[in-house]
Image: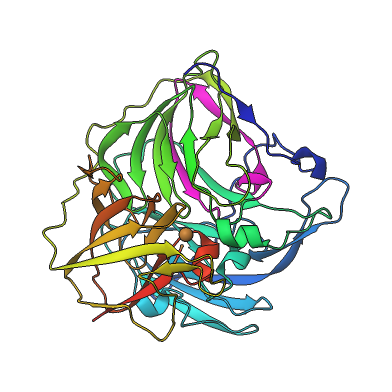
Amino acid sequence: HGSMDVGVMPAAGKLGLASGLPLPALMRLPLERKDGALQGCLTAAAVRLPLLSGRPATEFWAYNDSVPGPAIELSEGETLNLRFDNRLPQPTTVHWHGLPIPADQDGNPQDPVAPGQGRDYRFTLPAGCAGSYWYHPHPHGHTSEQVYRGLAGVFVVRSRNDPLAHLPERWLVLSDLKLDDDGGIAASSDADRMDGREGQFVLANGAWRPRLTLGVGERQRWRIWNATSARVLKLALPAHEVWLVGTDGGLLERPRRVENLLVPPGGRVELAVTGRFAPGLPAGLLALPYARGKMMGPEQDKALSLAEVDAGEAVATAPLPAKLRRIDALPRPAVKRSVVFSENMANPAAMFLINGRTFDMDRMDFTGKVGAVEEWEIDNQADMDHPFHLHGTQFQVTERHDGKGWRREPYLAWLDVVNVPPGQKVRLRFRQDMPGPRMFHCHILEHEDAGMMGMLDVR
Ligand code: C2O
Ligand code: CU
């Protein structure tokens, strides 16, 4: 490793944002068992929250007045019946990112909830979908703004036989905060719209560089969400022992020892972290420098500290099972399609394209079949990274092309976002088990809003 240069983002401290507070616990959505479902209420509205010392409270848009929104936790097989009310000045939807649920409950841009209106979202969680998901707005053209103003929350699905149930859990929702000089949420600049928005602060559970405690030798299970608009987070805990145990759609087949790992915007990981506190190495959670081919301004050139980790008492290390679960490789595809990302800077009205086109709510780009395995090749012919995301199911990446040749993916995992750097390609397979329109798009939210999105009609 050697010494590691850990930086603070420019202009950070000046605004009066406190760092080093204890990691905030996420608020939980109260759920009540009634009529065979778990019932809850979610309201999106403006709220003023104290953020900066010595300044008036900052206006956010939040679910149930909380940033991040309340965490929702259910088990496989359970049904959620959620009343949603929109008290925002804009239409919105609630999209259940990554969950295999019916298309008409998935908060698609075609199903907006007008200001002052509400609707129910109701769905049952199928067997085998235990994992770390999230929910966020998805109205066409306003997703980025609604997310950066504070609308996003996590959704954890539990399995009744979880091989890691014995480990204490930490949940970390990473988000970006960009403030203006008055301490309000800044409007997006042209550069933000082009590159994807990054703020002066990367927050964990709404706090800047919070502290958490890990016992010496203690093994904890960390779920981490990349809820930033645009950052590809190259996460590392250099002082500790880290195993990747799960991805977007739940556990891997077996733990994999990792030094660092790339989590694209929208993506999640589950880690088994053992407190080692190797001397000379930063004890915290870092985002290592990663160049994502931005067009404006410098790339991040220093590691960012996302959370500080304090050494707790020595604790016996809990075992990490060698096998977590079985994942079957998806069979040979019935259909192959190609998805090409490109940029056209000469046309500000349609700058980010998929197969040469910009999103049209009335156009189906592809027609697919319920239950048929599809193979998609995502080909990034643009100049910056574009993380590909598909609704309604999880996929398996089979191969990647780094510009020189194809390489088989070394292990099976369920994902719903995969980063595709410029000049590279990714092949993935999936099956949609329910009919209806499913969006696919770049998960840099500014690009999605700009039309880097298409629709698969599953019949
Ligand atoms: Cu997380 Cu279509 O989005
Ligand atoms: Cu993009």
* Residue displayed at 55% across by 24% down: 283
The spot of residue 189 in percent (x, y) is 68, 61
Please say whether residue 111 is visible from this viewpoint. Answer: yes
Q: Quadrant of residue 371?
A: bottom left
Q: Is residue 146 above or below residue 368?
A: above
The residue range painted magenta reads: 199-228
* Residue displayed at 51% across by 64% down: 447
Left/right of residue 215 with respect to residue 455 in the rendered view: right
The spot of residue 72 in percent (x, y) is 49, 59
The spot of residue 429 in percent (x, y) is 22, 59
* Residue displayed at 84% across by 45% down: 53
Q: Quadrant of residue 60?
A: bottom right
Q: Looking at the image, which residue sits at the far front?
A: 346
Magenta-highlighted stretch: main secondary structure? strand
Ligand 1 quadrant in view: bottom left
The spot of residue 58 in percent (x, y) is 78, 58
